[in-house]
Amino acid sequence: MTMLTAGFADPVLDAQACFRAVLEAMSRPGRIQRAGSALTPPAPLNQAAAAVLLALADADTPLWLDAGAEAEAWLRFHCGAPVAAAAGAAAFALATAAPPALAALDQGTEEEPQRGATLVLQVEALEEGEGWHLTGPGIEREHRLRVTGAPAGFVAAWAANRAGLPCGVDVILCAGDRLAALPRSVMIAEG
Amino acid sequence: MSTPDDRSAEGRGHLNRSRPNEGTMMEGYNFAYLDEATKRMIRRAILKAVAIPGHQIPFGAREMPLPYGWGTGGIQVTASILGPADTLKVIDQGSDDTTNAISIRRFFRRVAGVATTERTAEASVIQTRHRIPERTLREDQIMVYQVPQPEPLFKLEPRRAETKRLHALADYGLMHVRLYEDIARLGHIAKAYDYPVMVNGRYLMSPSPIPAFDNPKMHRMAALQLFGAGREKRIYAIPPYTEVRSLDFEDHPFRPIRAPHACAFCGSTDTYLDEVITDDAGGRMFVCSDTDFCTERQDAAASREAAE
Amino acid sequence: MYVAVKGGERAISAAHAWLEETRRGDPAVPELTIAQIEQQMPLAVDRVMAEGSCHDRFLAALAIKQAKGDLIEAAFLLRAYRTTLPRFGASEPLDTTRMRLRRRISATYKDLPGGQVLGPTFDYTHRLLDFALAAEGEDRAVAPEMPAPAAEVPRVTELLAREGLMQREALAEEEPGDLTRQPLAFPAERPVRLQNLARGDEGFLLALGYSTQRGYGNAHPFVGEIRVGHVTVEFTPPELGFPIELGEIGITECQMVNQFKGSRTEPAQFTRGYGLVFGHGERRAMAMSLVDRGLRARELGEDITAPAQDEEFVLYHSDNIEATGFVEHLKLPHYVDFQSELENLRSIRRTAEAALPEAAE
């Protein structure tokens, strides 16, 4: 077994910085943030996805992932999150390739919509100012976001996700050390 | 079993307890007081709150070293978001110099060593009790409200199991009836503070006990607004640029209330005023509740005079 | 000319200094030591540990000293400290049949295995002020040696259960909820209810328990047993996989025997109200067991008619740290909201006055 690479250099301040990036991303859907960490996670994990999970996942949040044994061992060691057998039982789902259907993840309930899962979705690239048209809470008029490597049929699946409000799934898109978020309330139109 | 000697910070098994500016910060406690697991739990709740505007998220509020009802919810939210780059402003009743505001500001200086300010414009995080600053807030600022009672329906239905169901059904008839009864009896809605709002057209929300005068500031605010209720263990949020409507009726539109006077210090006629009793013969004066805003206006007037 | 109040920072510092001065009292009187509080005010220490939700006699005694003897304030200090401690996990369930007993009484049997052990109790003392205590340095009568207790003393409720007359409690498979980490949710499971009551305000529990005896709720209680003493706490570290002893804690356990008329699925039998608290706290453990039984109304299919049966009412109002905080927060400035109310009332009065002359015409 190979040695695990390190987690956050400063577990307190790096987690805080990453959380603030995610908070900013979730508050202003489509605006790109830097996860701001110098992590060297095992492939296929990218820096932003690794930082998001280190900052937010722990023993209280079942984690589903498709990233393979090495990444799983790394995340288990640094987060202590139990691995969920099924995507539907996870608080956080990490997809480094084609993700499970949004509808297959925990949607929460009408009384407890906050139980809806967070999907951490690795994509190839994120670019502001072009691509999708985003509207909704957090957006003054419209934000544009180009997502390279988004799963096929994502925009249609998102419309279905949004139709279930207040239930549904929230997504954090991660590319390299950059991230953007799609809270369930945001509307996406193809660009 | 235990002696005073085993209770050094190391002996308690705390991780990550030594921070950069140790000299100014309280020893034996983590940055911003809360342990990292608690911060993660609160951070997860905050993110879900932002994703579901106006919905109350239950969270495992911790005992804080300040009493419940004195801002523990706001303090836990602030402690979970605060970083060393932040500048914190704390107000109570619009003022930085009320005793509880001072006490909370002192707490964060001690446990997080962050910079604090009394200037609204300089703050990145503003924790407040009962007011929203008069100055328009920016995108790079976060408002944190202290909330004593997060449930807007509590006076009409004290059972949380029941109000939870009403929120799920978006059944807010009780509140409409209550407001309509005011109109029938008094000619207008008699709620002067903690005036209920609809957030993003979905959830009825308590704006915390701010005066109704402040409600319109919440509507499409550029800053993120976070709400923490410690004793009631709930967190909720309004993302930036989100629709926030004070409940009203077509024939009885919402009216913000303020004392119909000008500030005795800065002359402002469109800010919220405190009434100050000056003697026991009916003497009174009205002054801005937002002390920073008032000082700025007085300074500006003084420099205009000096220039003339 | 009115000047906006400034100098709050100085006022707070001065208040803290005065508080410290009044805490110490007359410096000519010797200072209390933590050991004195721990040894000579053990029941105050026990109450603070129970309501502070942390078993540590030294810290509880320190909190009492710091709080000038205000036990709710002391419990608050202990709670605020407790919440910063790392959580290692849950202990093994305590085995109270193997308690090292100092006191054990049953009201339901004249004698029983393990015997009636009166132990150190205020019961049967005559409540006459003992002026001899006011004379310091007095040597007190030496108590006789306590008889060595049996290693294992069966519980009264177990004797009844073997006869099929006492409802058995279901053994929980999963780790019980912990309301210091998760907020209350309703309906609340019994372990969470018991946790809430175990650290609830003694006065609140007492009044509620009392109300069940006076017809507010359907209680027919007998004290099956009260036991006071020490019990071993064991913990299984995941890396070891077997339990190790952490030490002993003092506890009081009360099992209250209650009638139950039976339902469609259950025969008529006795049911249990349960109380377990840190230290020596009989009043508290007894009140807790009355309220616990009251709160079982829902699961036993009984009518819910009284406050002590209403779980939202009981569980949301039992915590004196929450209650004292919110009651006392009313002394914080509220002048902004009050101003809004003033203007509101003035406007209502103006409307009413404007309407008057018309009415007179």
Image (spheres, rainbow, N blue to C red):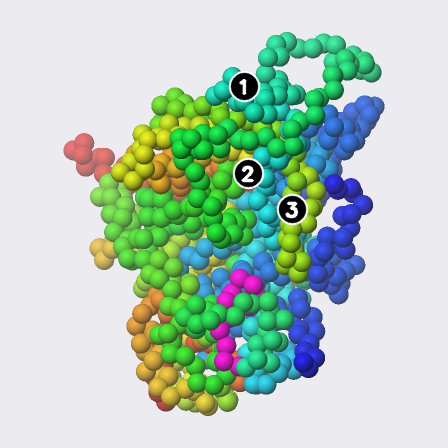
- Identity of the amino acid at label 2? Arg
Q: In the image, is residue C246 above or below residue C261?
A: below
Q: On the image, numbered disc 2 is attached to which residue?
A: C199
Q: On the image, numbered disc 3 is attached to which residue?
A: C234
Quadrant (top left, top right, bottom left, bottom right) of the C terminus of chain C = top left
Task: Please indicate, yes or no, whether residue C14 appears anywhere in the rendered image.
Answer: no
Looking at the image, which residue is at 53% across and 81% down?
A67
Viewer-side label of 2, 3: 3
- N-terminal of the pair, mark 3 or mark 1, is 1
Viewer-side label of 1, 2: 1
Residues drawn in magenta: A57-67
Residue A187 on image: x %, y %: 35, 77
Q: Secondary structure at mark 3?
A: strand
Q: In the image, is residue A2 above or below residue C279?
A: below
- Identity of the amino acid at label 1? Asp
Looking at the image, which residue is at 40% across and 40% down?
C311
Q: Are marks 3 and 1 in contact (CB under 8 Å)?
A: no
Q: On the image, numbered disc 1 is attached to which residue?
A: C111
User: C30 or A41: nearer the eye?
Assistant: A41
State which quadrant residue B78 falls in: bottom right
Quadrant (top left, top right, bottom left, bottom right) of the N terminus of chain C = top right
Instruction: Tell me which secondary structure the magenta stretch mostly adopts.
Output: loop
Residue B274 on image: x %, y %: 49, 47
- Identity of the amino acid at label 3? Glu
- N-terminal of the pair, mark 1 or mark 2, is 1
Residue B196 on image: x %, y %: 36, 53
- N-terminal of the pair, mark 2 or mark 3, is 2
